[in-house]
């Protein structure tokens, strides 16, 4: 019998070269991940940013008819303890009259789907050019609809934070919020 001239490993048997190729590829992948990880990790938000992602506000001291402003994610948030008249007025508006139709109930429902019509929580930034509307402090002009008035370009919002008049295209945004107790609300 003559000896075969086919080299070892040609029939699919693993050789030392095959092992070295796989090991080198695996080490290269591990090295690439080790180099890339600090850059990828740098894209995560900073601890101070994460701390601002949600806030808790005790609304116990807010009297009926009063509103306060709190900061959340660097933006003003208006929390208004609405009167029965403001609630009725907001609920009676026909959706066909609104440039950005949205029911009052949709705007006063927390993340647990609990409707609290006495509490309106909105981001206090005009949807036209990002101004802060007036109407949260006593004596501020509230416009024709009793909500908020942006003096920069004349946008007017009703007692539900919905745009009623002026150039603003959208209602004041409602942030995600949850009443954790009857008087403590977590925004964000």
Image: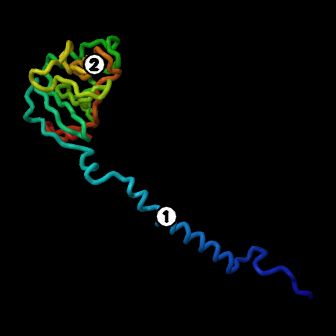
Residue at 30%, 53% in the rendered image: 46
Q: Which residue is at the front of the view, 73 or 8?
A: 73
Q: Where is residue 119 drawn, in percent x and y?
A: 18, 28
Bin the neighbour count of mark 2 within 10 Å (Cα to Cα): few under 14, some 14-19, many 20 and up: some
Could you tell me which residue is drawn at 7 percent across and 28 percent down?
A: 63
Question: Considering only vertical position in the picture, is 76 above or below 139?
Answer: below
Q: Is there any visible trace of residue 101 in the rendered image?
A: yes
Residue 153, numbered label: 2
Report, in whole angstroms, how far the alpha carbon at label 2 lies from the one at label 1: 52 Å
Q: Give x and y (percent) for residue 28.
A: 56, 69
- Mark positioned earlier in the residue sequence (2 or 1): 1
Residue ranking furthest to the right? 1
Question: Which residue is identified by label 1?
Answer: 33
For disc 1, the neighbor class at 10 Å (few under 14, some 14 to 19, many from 20) is few
- Nearer the observer, 112 or 172: 172
Q: Residue 132 falls in which quadrant of the image? A: top left
The local secondary structure at tag 2 comes to loop
Q: Front-most of 156 and 67?
A: 156
Q: Picture coordinates of residue 60 (x, y %)?
A: 9, 35
**Pointer 2 and pointer 1: residues touching (CB < 8 Å)?**
no
Left/right of residue 62 with respect to residue 10 in the rendered view: left
């Amino acid at each position: 019998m003559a000896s075969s001239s086919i080299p070892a490993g040609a029939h699919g048997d693993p050789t030392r070269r095959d092992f070295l190729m796989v090991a080198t590829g695996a080490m290269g992948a591990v090295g690439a991940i080790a180099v890339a990880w600090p850059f990828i990790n740098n894209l995560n938000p900073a601890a101070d940013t994460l701390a601002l992602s949600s806030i808790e506000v005790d609304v116990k001291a807010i009297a009926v008819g009063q509103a306060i402003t709190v900061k959340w994610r660097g933006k003003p948030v208006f929390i208004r303890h609405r009167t029965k008249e403001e609630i009725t007025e907001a609920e009676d508006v026909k959706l066909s009259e609104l440039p950005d139709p949205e029911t009052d109930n949709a705007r006063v429902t927390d993340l647990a789907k609990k409707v609290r019509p006495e509490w309106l929580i909105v981001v206090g930034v005009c949807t036209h050019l990002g101004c802060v509307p007036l109407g949260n402090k006593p004596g501020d002009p509230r416009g024709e609809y009793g909500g908020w008035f942006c003096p920069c370009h004349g946008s007017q919002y009703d007692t539900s934070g919905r745009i009623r008049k002026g150039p603003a295209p959208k209602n004041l945004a409602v942030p995600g919020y949850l009443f954790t107790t009857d008087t403590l609300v977590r925004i964000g």
